[in-house]
Amino acid sequence: MTTENVELTTEEVLRRDIPWETYMTTKLITGTGLQLLRRYDKKAESYKAQLLDDDGPGYVRVFVTILRDIFKEETVEYVLALIDEMLAANPKRARLFHDESLADEDTYEPFLRLLWKGNWFIQEKSCKILSLTVSARSKVQNGADANGDASSSKKKITTIDDVLAGVVEWLCAQLKKPTHPTRSIPSTINCLSTLLKEPVVRSSFVRADGVKLLVPLISPASTQQSIQLLYETCLCVWLLSYYEPAIEYLATSRALPRLIEVVKGSTKEKVVRVVILTLRNLLSKGTFSAHMVDLGVLQIVQSLKAQAWSDEDLLDALNQLEQGLKENIKMLSSFDKYKQEVLLGHLDWSPMHKDPIFWRENINNFEENDFQILRVLITILDTSSDARTLAVACYDLSQFIQCHSAGRIIVNDLKAKERVMRLLNHENAEVTKNALLCIQRLFLGAKYASFLQA
């Protein structure tokens, strides 16, 4: 890459005079192309807009032809600057690249080639133009390829899959090893925040290990530029939060604590909104909700709710997050409370023992630390002299046998049967009743013993 053009701007490039006539003399552009360029080049914005309204695809054809056939750096930069200016004034003009009259033109190929061959100005503009034009295509193409109904064409035309694969490869390469010290990362993230709306880009980005390259960029920002970069990074993460394989990557990275740091420190509504929408998407996935509880997200959500936000989506997402986290805390805390009760060795008929929802939602928690709580419960049958504790322990064992798919086998393996059998002769009726229930479930299994529930 050459470094002299590192800081070029579109405005500077467009101040150049390009000798179009010379290119016509050497047959690198046609007479029609020259006419269009003379009519368009160096004219006022409103006049150019009129020309594009009249014959937009004609101008796109001329621009793409020049990029395909002319390799002089100053001219390539100039045409890219013209296209950049045209799309900046009205992004909907990206649709012109997909006009039926251009079906025989490989409109993507020059930009894809220039991504790897040009200096930074050329690379950045090519990536931006590709992102906008790819996103503007019709998503239903009736078996045609990316450029329109080109399936009958004899020449090989760059397909949409070629384009997306090439762009994702270039974007990941920039994230790993930026070509430009200050522009690479913002430009890359800007393009990604557009392209990750495409399911095929999400999957190739994850396959290229792109998710872990995004995570370090999720950090609180202060300047206007860094806030925009942060917003677009979070937008990328939000788009990825709809894609299961990406969620697995996010779960094993530091994405969650970083997102929480950002939302705690940000006053920009658009940043808060996109982070909260991401957290809402992740709430029901894997262990995210438990981590959110540990990281104090409920308190953050409640303090955010107290602020005056104008965005309805943000308010809805805050309410959904609050409700989901409260339910999670309730579930977690009920089992934590239960664990505490068992570990203290003193059991009572608190509501959770006979609450079917408690058993259904927490049955897998009994497997923690090699069934530690179950082992303690069985030990209590030997060590406790309190009748209420013994009765509740027998009842809880019978509930475990009933609710866990391998309950009988596990309880038998832990040698609980003999201990419960001994309690059938206990002097307290409450103990004998629950010991009997437990033995019946051990022998009969949950299916036949469910009617015996006290």
Image (spheres, rainbow, N blue to C red):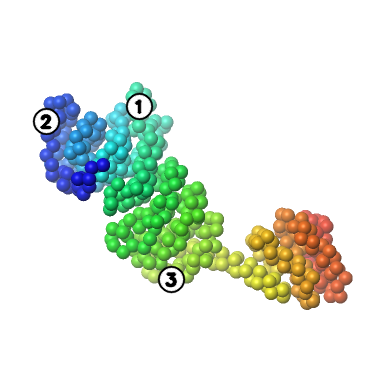
Q: Which disc number belongs to residue 303?
A: 3
N-terminal of the two: label 1 or label 3? Answer: 1
At mark 1, the secondary structure is loop
Q: Report, in whole angstroms, how far the alpha carbon at label 2 lies from the one at label 3.
A: 66 Å
Residue at 79% x, 56% y: name it: 445
How many labels, in total? Answer: 3
Q: Which disc number belongs to residue 21?
A: 2
| Rendering coords of residue 452 (x, y %) | 80, 62
Q: Report, in whole angstroms, how far the alpha carbon at label 1 lies from the one at label 3.
A: 58 Å
Front one among 248 and 140: 248
Three-letter code, disc 2: Glu
**Mark 2 touching mark 3, by CB under 8 A?**
no
- 335 shown above or below 203: below
Three-letter code, disc 3: Ser
Residue 450 can be seen, yes or no: no
Q: Which disc number belongs to residue 156?
A: 1
N-terminal of the two: label 2 or label 3? Answer: 2
Q: Which disc number belongs to residue 399?
A: none
At mark 3, the secondary structure is helix
Residue 325 falls left or right of residue 370? left
Category of crowding for the residue at label 2, using alpha-carbon neighbours closer than 10 angstroms: few (below 14), some (14–19), many (at least 20): some
Front one among 382 and 353: 382
Front one among 185 and 387: 185
Residue at 15% x, 35% y: name it: 37
The residue mark sitting in front, 1 or 3, is: 1
| Rendering coords of residue 393 (x, y %) | 75, 69
N-terminal of the two: label 1 or label 2? Answer: 2
